[in-house]
Image (tube, helix red, strand yellow):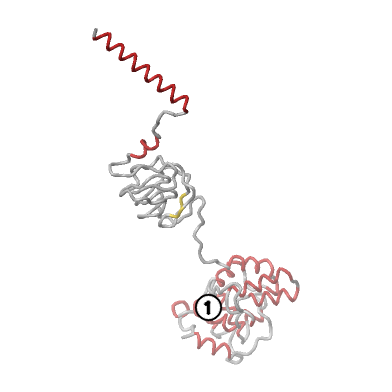
Amino acid sequence: MATSRFRAWTLAGAGALGALAACNQMLGIDSASVDPRLTAAGAGSAGHAPASPSGAGGTDATGVSTGGTSGGQQTASGGSSGQKAHSGGSSADDGEAGATHGTPGTGGSSATGGSTVTGGEHGEHDDGASGEAGAGGAPASGPVDLCNEYCDILDDACKSDAEQYRDRDQCMTICHLLPQGTVGGADDDSVACRLKYAQKTRYTNGAETAGYCREAGPGGDGRCGTVCEGYCTLMAQVCTQQTAGMYHFASNDDCLATCNALPQATVPYSDTNPLVSDGNHALCRLFHVASAAMADADEHCEHAMGVTLCEATGQ
């Protein structure tokens, strides 16, 4: 009798479950399921929050919603706070727990240290140490070096009687000894000013080109500083007590006073004109200090100070 009642109850229970399933199907009710991402990434380690399924944010270990904001030392895009968070994942003490199952975030955010992580990476660490830009990030910018463009133009446009430097190496060396200046600023003894006049040679020819080459040259030709300003700027760095012994100036004021007292040159500055490299004028001294920057500073600094070649008549 007991067996019969058990079978009846079993059949009745099965019938009830079948009826319930049929009812759910008619009403469009789906069976409950568990998102595998919640069970796979949520555990991490004891006390850590599960990964946010959208990668747009999550909660840290204390249960406070972070919404994808940076925290700790490094934060990857779409992740929540922690010392090292993974893309789309939740926080962990060292980025080890709950790390790999977050879905891609929506954008890249910078980590402390300068490198950038995109939201499409799963479970990768951003070490934040190199300062290099990751995908979607802009590289760090530094001061612009004007010398490459400047020397390229002079090497191409200023030739023969208009030549200002013996070769591109000398141009680059002298350029880096001059003040860089401000592009678009006022005319002064700077590379920025010299570059401006060098660029004008692209639209000229003949004597006009030669004039721009001199203004772009080491002496500035009165446009980008005076010849004496260019000369003394180089003397202070090239002909020093260490490199040239007695053939140096004690101060920039002494240099300018001496140079400004020299007779006016009767020839325009050119690296190829022998009347420039041998004469009692500032252009001769400018030529030799530019030569001293490349080699034989002890010999050329002597000339740059007015001893032989650039000496006064009868001295």
Q: Which part of the image, by quadrant, shows the C terminus?
A: bottom right
Give the image quarter of residue 208.
bottom right
Residue 115 relative to residue 93: left or right: right
Characterize the local packing of mark 1: few (<14), some (14-19) or many (20 or more) Cα atoms within 10 angstroms. some
The residue under label 1 is which amino acid type?
Glu
Say which residue label 1 marks.
299
| 219 w.r.t. 23: above or below | below
Secondary structure of the residue carrying tag 1 is helix
Query: Residue at coordinates 46% horizontally, 46% vertically from top-left?
Result: 105
Q: Nearer the viewer, residue 50 or 260?
A: 50
x and y, in percent, of residue 231 in the image: 56, 81
Q: Nearer the viewer, residue 193 or 289?
A: 193
Residue 139 appears anywhere in the view: yes
Query: Residue at coordinates 49% horizontally, 77% vertically from top-left?
Result: 237
Query: Residue at coordinates 55% horizontally, 66% vertically from top-left?
Result: 144
Give the image quarter of residue 310.
bottom right
Give the image quarter of residue 185.
bottom right
Judged from this view, the residue extending furthest toward the right is: 206
Query: Residue at coordinates 40% horizontally, 23% vertically from top-left?
Result: 20
**Looking at the image, how many numbered discs can be counted on the residues?**
1
x and y, in percent, of residue 157 in the image: 69, 68
| 133 w.r.t. 38: above or below | below
Residue 6 relative to residue 229: left or right: left
